[in-house]
């Protein structure tokens, strides 16, 4: 049973990170040359994900990724696009059913707990106050401390998809 549960945790960790992107098709992303990080919210009850060090790490990761895309960081004043982000974590559990018993006629139920960390990065046009781009990065790990270890990767993978490809 322990081996089965361990196998499920390994499976969760292997295919866990998911990135979703939403973009305003009418927005002209080529006019965004500067950015400011306006608001970072940490909505986790777990101290591993809700502290000033995590906020600084996310700010630095977002700044580095957007500068690599050619945008210039503006610490104060007016920017072409404002960045806001939210990080949260929820405890979940996966239920798996397996054949068990004599000739597989019974069922064994295994409950595997895990933490889903979600990072939402929003880019807003301050002239219209509208959302122009959003990335949602999800990471599933056995506990929140392991989600914290993946934050840099979540930021990088999310902002690798900026700006959106023209369709």
Image (cartoon, grey):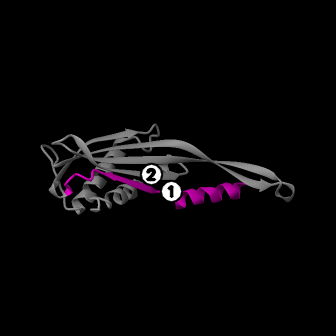
Seen at 28% across and 58% down, the residue is: 162
Tag 1, which secondary structure?
Answer: loop
Seen at 42% across and 44% down, the residue is: 49
Quadrant of the rendering where the N terminus is positioned: bottom right
Seen at 30% across and 55% down, the residue is: 61
**Residue farthest to the left?**
77
Q: What is the span of residues highlighted in magenta in the rendered image?
A: 1-29
**Residue farthest to the right?**
102
Task: Report the number of numbered marks.
Answer: 2
Q: Is residue 35 above or below residue 47?
A: below
Tag 2, which secondary structure?
Answer: strand
Seen at 20% across and 56% down, the residue is: 29
Disc 2: which residue:
138
First of labels 1, 2 by sequence position: 1
Which one is in front, 39 or 18?
18
Quadrant of res 66: bottom left
Mark 1 and mark 2: Cα distance apart in space: 7 Å
Where is residue 47 shown, x and y percent of the image? 44, 40
Which one is in front, 27 or 9?
27
Disc 1: which residue:
16
The magenta stretch spans residue 35: no
Asked if disc 1 and disc 2 are in contact, CB closer than 8 Å, the reply is yes
Q: Is residue 68 above or below residue 34?
A: below
Quadrant of the rendering where the C terminus is positioned: bottom left
Q: Is residue 164 left or right of residue 33?
A: right
Where is residue 67 shown, x and y percent of the image? 22, 59
Where is residue 87 shown, x and y percent of the image? 39, 44
């Amino acid at each position: 049973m322990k081996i089965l549960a361990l196998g499920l945790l390994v499976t969760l960790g292997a295919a866990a990170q998911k990135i979703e992107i939403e973009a305003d098709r009418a927005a002209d992303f080529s006019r965004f040359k500067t950015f400011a990080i306006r608001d970072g919210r940490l909505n986790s009850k777990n101290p591993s994900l809700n502290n000033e060090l995590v906020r600084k790490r996310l700010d630095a990761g977002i700044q580095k990724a957007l500068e690599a895309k050619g945008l210039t960081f503006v610490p104060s004043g007016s920017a072409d696009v404002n960045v806001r982000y939210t990080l949260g974590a929820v405890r979940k559990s996966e239920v798996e059913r397996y054949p068990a018993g004599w000739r597989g006629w019974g069922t064994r139920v295994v409950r595997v707990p895990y933490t889903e960390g979600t990072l939402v990065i929003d880019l807003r046009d301050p002239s219209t106050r509208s959302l122009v781009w959003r990335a949602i990065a999800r990471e599933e790990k056995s506990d929140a401390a392991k989600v914290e270890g993946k934050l840099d990767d979540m930021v990088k993978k999310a902002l690798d998809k900026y700006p959106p490809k023209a369709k």
